[in-house]
Amino acid sequence: MIRELGRFERISAHSHIRGLGLDENLRAKDVADGLVGQKKAREAAGVIVRLIKSGKMAGRGILLAGPPGTGKTAIAVAISKELGRDIPFVHVSASEFYSAEMKKTEALIQSMRKAIGVRIRERRIVLEGEIVGLDYNMIPNPYNPTQKIPESANLTLATTEERRSFSVGGRIALQFLSQGIEIGDVIIVDKETGRVSRIGRSEKAKKKYDIGDEDLVPVPSGRVEKEREFTYVVTLHDLDEANARRGGIFSLFAPSSREIDNEVRQEVDEHVRRLIEEGRAELLPGVMFIDETHLMDIELFAFMNRAMESEMAPIIILASNRGFSRIRGTDIVAPHGIPLDLLDRLLIITTEPYSREEIRNIIDIRALEMGVTIDEKALEKLTDIGEKMSLRYAVQLLAPANEFSKLRNSSRIELQDVERAESIFSDVSQSSAYLKKWEEKMLGM
Ligand SMILES: Nc1ncnc2c1ncn2[C@@H]1O[C@H](COP(=O)(O)OP(=O)(O)O)[C@@H](O)[C@H]1O
Ligand SMILES: [Mg+2]
């Protein structure tokens, strides 16, 4: 619910990664969870995951530094898999902070707040049971008389112990219709808000009517009306947006990506602090992963540095493939183009270029993930390309090579398919060298 992994394409290049592939002693296995080699970095990441899970990393940062195609993004994705569902993980590229829709610092703070979860516990009075009776009382829609809408409904709910009937209003009845809820379903109705949730199909009803074998659930025990505890996780950003919307109905039509007042955020922070003091909520600091860090400028760095001091700050993971370079927006040259005061707070993990064997293994795993088989010679060729050009390019050539094998009515990528794909697609180093040559030619004219 609270994963904010960014666009689908960005993830799909890493879809073979299931975790960090470590044993109980946090030692990296040769090949596990879709990861190959890069053992020191994976073991370091494993320690970080432990620190995050025990709440000892909040407000601190990590820098993944290494040449392009050495698995920095892959390791960040593996960290997110290891953290599990409840801890938020936000994946952004620094280029996304620059947009026409909002100030760059606003985009950064929104991302940071998407990376902080709040687990809220609430006790609520609910009606719970299997629907054994449901009759609608339909009337013409006052705004469109050709349509009928429910004015009310008679609802009978049963548990293993009792059976009770209620007359419910149009708003609840409409939820039954729109969610396709019918006799034999087990539901929960929040008595205060009137929100209806369908839990599943009752096992008893299934026996009686013998329809489908979907999500079967037992008939609830106890009374129909009861107090239940609910826990759910939302992010600070979710709460900011909900709080900002209270402004009135017209804000419903406002574009979804827009700036949020600082006052709104302060209110949310205060409210969350109160819930925590009362023991009704706990904070789940998650991770904000910023890829292509060199695109951040001095203003963003300064802003982030300050924000990291707040008690409600996420863990920051940066990835950089630059050595010494200019900090954007200044003439200062610094390691990785990152200001020294920020560097001081970062734990650094380096990634190293892969051996031939490892490149071969990674390409093989990707082919497996895509569900394609690959001929020995074709795999050798792709390994050559991965070694000489870049791993990313070799991995990317799998998809077109697979299309060419299909054109031959073959279900196996062969050498000719890889060669054909290589002959028409370029690696970035080729395409940029090509354009550079063009520029020089134009200048010489
Ligand atoms: N150790 C690894 N094991 C398995 N796949 C990897 C590994 N390192 C990189 N990859 C895959 O190789 C490709 C390029 O790696 P990537 O993580 O994008 O490198 P970087 O972010 O350092 O430029 C991606 O598809 C990635 O999932
Ligand atoms: Mg990357």
Image (cartoon, helix red, strand yellow):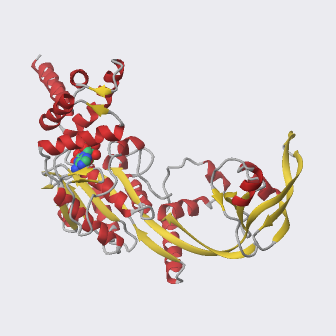
**Residue 46's x, y, as percent?**
26, 64
- Indicate the quadrant where residue 428 lies: top left
**Residue 351's x, y, as percent?**
17, 54
Residue closer to the observer: 206 or 26: 206
Q: Residue reaching furthest left?
A: 444
The answer to whether residue 128 is left or right of residue 115 is right
**Residue 205's x, y, as percent?**
75, 57
Question: Which residue shows up at 21% across the image and 29% down it?
Answer: 378
Q: Residue reaching furthest top?
A: 445
The answer to whether residue 5 is left or right of residue 336 is right
Query: Quick check: can you spot residue 338?
Result: no
**Residue 133's x, y, as percent?**
84, 59
The answer to whether residue 354 is left or right of residue 303 is left
Relative vertical location of residue 145 with respect to residue 424 in this rendering, above or below: below
Question: What is the number of callouts on the image?
Answer: 0
- Indicate the quadrant where residue 44 lies: bottom left
Question: Which residue shows up at 16% across the image and 51% down it?
Answer: 66
Question: Which residue shows up at 32% across the image and 68% down it?
Answer: 308
Query: Quick check: can you spot residue 10?
Result: yes
Question: Which residue shows up at 81% across the image and 60% down it?
Answer: 132
Relative vertical location of residue 191 with respect to residue 203 in this rendering, above or below: below
The answer to whether residue 21 is left or right of residue 228 is left
Residue closer to the observer: 250 or 238: 238
